Image (spheres, helix red, strand yellow):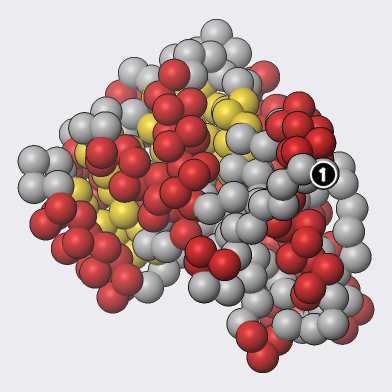
Amino acid sequence: MNVVITGSTKGIGLGMAREFLERGHNVMISSRTPQAVDNVVAEFREAYPERNVAGRVCDVGDYGQVQNLWDRAFEILGSVDIWVNNAGVETGADLFYKQDRKTIEATINTNMTGLMYCNQIAINGMYKQGGGKIFNMEGFGSNGMVRPRVSVYGTTKCGVRYFTKAVAAELEGSPVKVCYLSPGIVITDLLVPPPDERGEGWEQSKKILNLLADTVETVTPFLVEGMLAVKEGGEAVRWLTPGKIIKRKLQSYVRKRDVFTPLGY
């Protein structure tokens, strides 16, 4: 299969790209940073010489750049069987009324507007080629949970679930499938603040994260296998299920998880 992943030069996006390549599929890398795209493409071409690996700079909040990403992927790979909307940004950990307007705009432009651009362009492209699967990345707020200091990000992710449900319903019975993708809580730079920005609540946050969070290497194989297995629109590939949370809470009375020490945090 041929796969496009937005925001795939680091974190979960990079991990998913590697997992698709490991399973014999071709990948189009993308992010907003030209050097990062070049570096990842060079790394993957060396590690997987038998795969077709390409890259394109893309700010998903720019409709023209998203269209260019599709066109380039179709030109190089020949088709786009799976499109993963992974690109996302966080507003930071400040109270909403203190946040800079540009930061708010950037979060909405990437997480919501950009995701809509990607869906529209990918849907039209997949209709023309005869079909395909699109996965929209959920995050904190998708299930309605609310936490202070995550107001803008959580709002966009709540919107992602509604948008995905609505578009999946619109495309019911068509060859284009729009689905949900949820990695749970994954330890990445987006989640862990730099040492000089960790406030008094960091140690408490670590306790919760040690219970519920996982590494990129743990989660991405599950996500990729799930995406490959999906057959119908509206299906969800979700790692951290309610049952898994309950099991971990029970296990914590016997053995404490530590996901940070091995990563050097």
Which residue sits furthest top?
173
Horizontally, residue 187 falls left or right of residue 107, namely: left
Residue 156 in the image: state x and y as whole percent: 74, 53
Residue at 77% from the left image edge and 43% from the top image edge = 254
Of the 4 image quadrants, the one containing the N terminus is top left
Which residue sits furthest front?
254
Query: Which is nearer the eye, 14 or 64?
Result: 14
Q: Is residue 120 visible?
A: no
Query: Which is nearer the eye, 64 or 202?
Result: 202
Q: Mark 1 points at which residue?
A: 253
Horizontally, residue 228 falls left or right of residue 119, namely: left
Residue 259 in the image: state x and y as whole percent: 60, 58
Residue 116 in the image: state x and y as whole percent: 59, 46
What element does badge 1 sit on? Answer: loop
Which image quarter: residue 191?
A: bottom right
Residue 245 in the image: state x and y as whole percent: 76, 37
Of the 4 image quadrants, the one containing the C terminus is bottom right
Residue at 60% from the left image edge and 65% from the top image edge = 260
Q: How many labels does the image show?
A: 1
Whether 252 is drawn above or below 170: the answer is below
